[in-house]
């Protein structure tokens, strides 16, 4: 396989960022034999982080995907090509001859397809890890919710569409969990992450904040400093997934971090320290932000009303099963450093979320005018 210079630089940059985990990934723990791990997907965000760590710990990795997204990543890893939908092309045929200790499914969005892959590998794998989401829970979310909270549902569970506003995303994730558990009863591990953040993130959601603070000036920040916020660094999640494979851990887990409640103001302060010293946050109340049309701030959610419980999920079970977290300020620094390399290497893949400069300026002006009038 030929690796282009662009792909090689991109892969090297991602690998370097992933290596800065703060964890000893040079070898698997004592008494843990090398595992054969199949990753369904593996080219987006969590997949590459997991592969990097699994390889560093001495495990053998196989990737299964269509071969269309970043195909030159990990040139030394075995690659099987096909489609998650068994009705398209060769479907899952490439998986019929393999055997693995564990399968990590981070690309399953529809229960029919997750069920098909889980059923096919059931006699060929000991464990099936399905990466779900805290969106799988019924809304409004309870405060300090555990893995026993009610799950989302949808009127027609056979629909294979996220909906116009992604309103079915969570319910479909819940149905995918059930499909995996049905195909491999007692051998499924369900992971429900919150916002996955850090280097190599293509969504631009969390990345918006350190990049925006690095630009400096006045920055519109919604809510109040005491609002809770939950994030998990992709490297911490990936290291934990490998740990779960090594230990053969089954069950359902909320993968939300950090270990202690993180205040929104603390994360904003971390962005200030990592960015431009001229950056000045302008705090704007949630109720005022809600009245503005077309303004959407990524990651943050109001600590009130229907979203009050969104950033308060309990992670006790995951922590007990070995999940560890790096400091949020390290994630901020690493994400900003990574983004600056990507601006030159992979423009187009990483686009920032959040309001435009014009929207932000208008919002700050409107808030100041409203505050002046009210005062």
Image (spheres, rainbow, N blue to C red):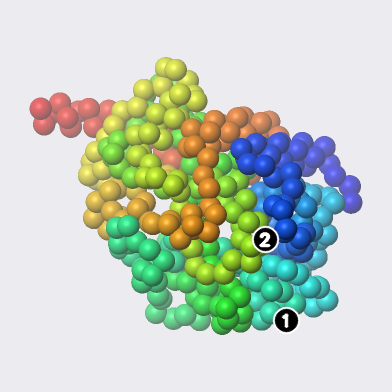
Residue identified by numbered label 1: 123
Residue in the foreground of this view, choosing between 184 and 201: 184
| Residue nearest the observer in this picture, 371 or 239 | 239
Which tag, 2 or 1, sits closer to the chain's start?
Answer: 1
Residue 243 seen in this snapshot? yes
Q: Residue furthest right?
A: 1
**Which element type, helix, strand or loop, lies under badge 1?**
loop
Q: Which mark is residue 183?
A: none
Residue 298 location (% of width, % of height):
42, 44
Mark 2 packing: few (<14 Cα in 10 Å), some, or many (20+)? many
Q: Secondary structure at mark 2?
A: helix
Q: In the image, is 110 to the left or to the right of 30? A: left
Rendering coords of residue 22 (x, y %)? 61, 38
| Residue mark closest to the camera, 2 vs 1 | 2
Q: Give how far apart the Cα atoms at labels 2 and 1 are.
A: 19 Å
> Farthest residue toward the left?
375
Q: How many neighbours does mark 1 have within 10 angstroms: few (below 14), some (14-19), or many (20 or more)?
A: few
Q: For residue 246, which numbered disc appears in the image? A: 2
């Amino acid at each position: 396989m030929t690796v282009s210079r662009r792909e090689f630089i991109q892969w090297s940059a991602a690998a370097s960022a992933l290596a800065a985990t703060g964890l000893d990934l040079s070898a698997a723990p004592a008494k843990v034999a090398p595992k054969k791990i199949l990753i369904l997907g593996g080219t987006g965000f969590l997949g590459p982080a997991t592969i990097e760590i699994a390889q560093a710990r001495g495990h053998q990795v196989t990737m299964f995907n269509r071969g269309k997204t970043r195909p030159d990543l990990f040139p030394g890893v075995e690659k099987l090509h096909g489609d998650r939908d068994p009705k398209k092309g060769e479907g899952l045929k490439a998986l019929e001859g393999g055997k693995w200790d564990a399968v990590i499914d981070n690309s399953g969005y529809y229960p029919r397809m997750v069920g098909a892959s889980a059923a096919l590998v059931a006699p060929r794998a000991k464990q099936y890890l399905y990466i779900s989401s805290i969106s799988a829970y019924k809304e409004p979310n309870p405060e300090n919710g555990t893995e026993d909270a009610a799950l989302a549902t949808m009127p027609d569970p056979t629909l294979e569409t996220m909906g116009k506003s992604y309103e079915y995303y969570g319910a479909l994730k819940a149905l995918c969990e059930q499909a995996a558990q049905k195909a491999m009863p007692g051998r499924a591990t369900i992971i429900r992450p919150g916002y996955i953040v850090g280097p190599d993130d293509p969504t631009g959601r969390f990345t918006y904040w350190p990049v925006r603070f690095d630009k400096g000036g006045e920055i519109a920040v919604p809510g109040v400093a005491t609002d809770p916020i939950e994030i998990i660094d992709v490297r911490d999640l990936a290291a934990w997934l490998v740990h779960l494979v090594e230990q053969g851990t089954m069950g359902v887990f909320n993968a939300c971090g950090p270990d202690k409640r993180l205040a929104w103001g603390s994360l904003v302060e971390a962005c200030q320290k990592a960015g431009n010293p001229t950056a000045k946050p302008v705090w704007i109340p949630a109720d005022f932000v809600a009245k503005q049309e077309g303004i959407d701030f990524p990651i943050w959610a109001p600590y009130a009303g229907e979203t009050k419980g969104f950033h308060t999920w309990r992670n006790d079970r995951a922590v007990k099963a070995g999940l560890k977290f790096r400091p949020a300020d390290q994630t901020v620094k690493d994400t900003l450093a990574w983004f600056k390399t990507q601006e030159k290497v992979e423009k187009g893949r990483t686009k920032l979320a959040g309001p435009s400069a014009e929207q932000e300026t208008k919002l700050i002006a409107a808030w100041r005018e409203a505050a002046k009038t009210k005062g």
